Image (cartoon, coloured by chain):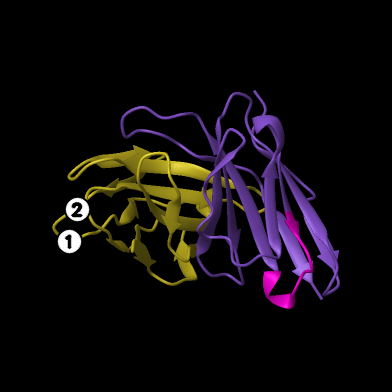
Chain colours: A yellow, B purple
Amino acid sequence: GDSVTQMEGPVTLSEEAFLTINCTYTATGYPSLFWYVQYPGEGLQLLLKATKADDKGSNKGFEATYRKETTSFHLEKGSVQVSDSAVYFCALGRGGNKLTFGTGTQLKVEL
Amino acid sequence: EAGVTQFPSHSVIEKGQTVTLRCDPISGHDNLYWYRRVMGKEIKFLLHFVKESKQDESGMPNNRFLAERTGGTYSTLKVQPAELEDSGVYFCASSQTMTGYSYEQYFGPGTRLTVT
């Protein structure tokens, strides 16, 4: 079945540092890939998505590229801010059906 | 437009008791999903409604869990009797009926269930 593996946290960075959170997946066919973010005290929000190979999703300075050859969808940001502190979840989905999530990576950004 | 709402935000019950969680999806969204995150692990799918019908309930852990969606609007998830391993955060999400491959599930804030 489908599965998603993402790097374990917590990840602690200084403000303005470069961020990479690794995500790889196992799936047949061509699922859509997502990054969701959960800020403290809030629900999950869609951060970005990609629906086919080589697509790049981007939002709020975050980017991720759908790499079918490496089955990866790594999240990157060039310069993190304290306000980016949150839990980040990688997920895959097919059509309007269920999402399969990774375990989440907690990011803490310090001044 | 209101987002997905869930009630209660937090529930603490004793083992063996019954708890009912409620989810109100975004108005007009036919699809409603329940997920659960246990002890900092991955968020796991429980079930999927399309309007009032259960489209996929493959993630329901056992028959102590009962989900309903009255009239295709709000949904309830009842746990009876609750066990310690049921503790976690229960998320609800909703989405529009999709076309093509592009869709988005909108999540509620979650209900944190603690069974003692």
Quarter holding the N terminus of chain A is bottom left
Q: Residue B54: which numbered mark, if any?
A: none
Q: What residue type is labelled 1?
A: Thr
Disc 2 element:
loop
Whole-number angstrom distance, CA of label 2 to CA of label 1: 6 Å
Residue A47, percent from left and from top: 44, 43
Between residue B115 and residue A5, name the one nearer to us: B115
- Within the image, what quadrant is residue B51 found in? top right
Is there a contact, CB below 8 Å, between mark 2 and mark 1? yes
Q: Is residue B80 visible?
A: yes
On screen, A36 above or below A3?
above
| Residue that extends furthest to the left in the rendered view of this protein | A69
- Within the image, what quadrant is residue B111 found in? bottom right
Q: Does the magenta stretch include residue A67?
A: no
Instruction: Specify start and end residues of the magenta stretch as a single range.
Output: B78-86
Judge from the rendering whether residue A74 lies leftward or rightward of residue A10; answer left or right. Answer: left
Residue matched to label 1: A70
- Within the image, what quadrant is residue B113 found in? bottom right
Residue B85, percent from left and from top: 68, 75
Mark 2 Cα shell of 10 Å, populated few (<14), some (14-19), many (≥20):
some
On screen, B6 above or below B86?
above
Disc 1 element:
loop
What's the residue at 43%, 72% (across, down)?
A8
Judge from the rendering whether residue A105 lies leftward or rightward of residue B101; answer left or right. Answer: right
Residue matched to label 2: A67
Mark 1 Cα shell of 10 Å, populated few (<14), some (14-19), many (≥20):
few
Q: Can residue A110 be seen in this view?
A: no
Residue A67, percent from left and from top: 19, 53
Tag 1 subunit: A
Q: Which amino acid does label 2 sit on?
A: Arg
What's the residue at 17%, 44% (across, down)?
A54
